Amino acid sequence: MKSIASLLSAAALGAAALLIPGVAHAAAPNYVALGDSYASGVGTRTYISSSGSCQRSTKAYAYLDAGRIGANLTFVACSGAKVADVTANQLPSVTSAANIVSVQVGGNDAGFSSVITECAKPSWLGDCNSAVASAQSIINNTLPGRLNSLYASIKSRASSAKVVVVGYPRLFNGTDCNAGTFFSGDEMTKLNATADLLNSKLAAAASAAGFAFVNPTSKFIGHSVCGNPEWINGLSNPISESYHPNVTGQAAYADLVQPAL
């Protein structure tokens, strides 16, 4: 039979072990993912049925990264969202309990879909130059104020959270290999320049708010529409899948975003 002294010694050792750093498990972080179709996972062709028209996918980078880091994910990104939609419909999910927030929005404010549609037409039928100029005007003159307001709201709701702003890739490598689209070399160059401009405004607003910014441009070079391998869908059926990252593209996004989280 063990002596009283040995039992007390064992108890003391057990109590000491509880005080050793690393013995206790930290609580899983709370991750809130905000944004538009690029954030929700449109382009992956598989969606969570309960997400409806928001088309959230388990292949989206936020879903992948939440699994990698063991986070509790609140996934509210929604296809078609503009900054105002994120503010009205998604921002309430950001609370003081959030440890991590990612946000990717701005493309729809600039009319992403309508610009691509216009530029995909034959030159005699569409006016790509005017569409691009209009988008760039919005990006330069209207979007920064909207972003500043949204980012300030995120900061006020979750002041201690790590916030990551996610940018957009260039869509083209200089080749249009899709039947049914008529992008010229000059049009593709202008569309890529517009993506760069959008990223510059996102980065500036993120920096002003003290947020991290993830720029996917360099990683996607060679893998845009008609790339090898292609990480961004070209013209697709259904058309809503067009010009969005596919499963491989979302995985590439996950690799970029995870270190920032």
Image (spheres, rainbow, N blue to C red):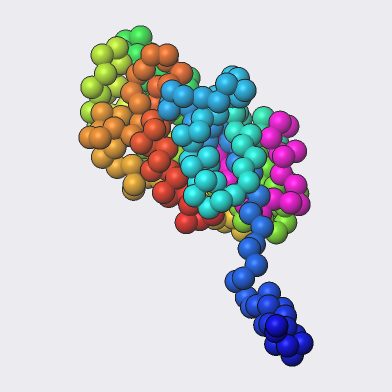
Left or right of 151 in this view: 137: left
> From the viewer's perspective, is 109 left or right of 121?
right
Quarter placement of the C terminus: bottom right
Looking at the picture, tell me which residue is in the foreground, 68 or 226. Answer: 68
State yes or no: residue 26 in magenta.
Answer: no
Q: Where is residue 43 in the image (x, y as percent from the top left)?
A: 43, 26
Residue at figure coordinates x 59%, y 49% from the top left: 71
Q: Give the range drawn in magenta.
A: 88-105
Pick the residue in front: 24 or 38. 24
Residue 136 position in % (x across, y down)? 48, 34
Quadrant in which residue 33 is drawn: top right
Image vertical order of residue 215 relative to residue 47, above or below: below
Residue at horizontal 46 percent and vertical 18 percent from the top: 240
Q: Is residue 235 left or right of residue 34?
A: left
Tell me, yes or no, whether the highlighted magenta stretch contains residue 98.
Answer: yes
Residue furthest front as drawn: 1
* 19 and 120: which is toward the camera: 19
The x, y position of residue 138, in whole percent, is 55, 33
> Which percent across, then down, holds residue 87?
70, 36
Asked whether the viewer can see residue 124, the reply is yes
Query: Taking 120 as reference, is 33 left or right?
Result: right
Screen quadrant of the N terminus: bottom right
Question: Can the viewer see residue 118 in this picture?
Answer: no
Residue extending farthest bottom:
5
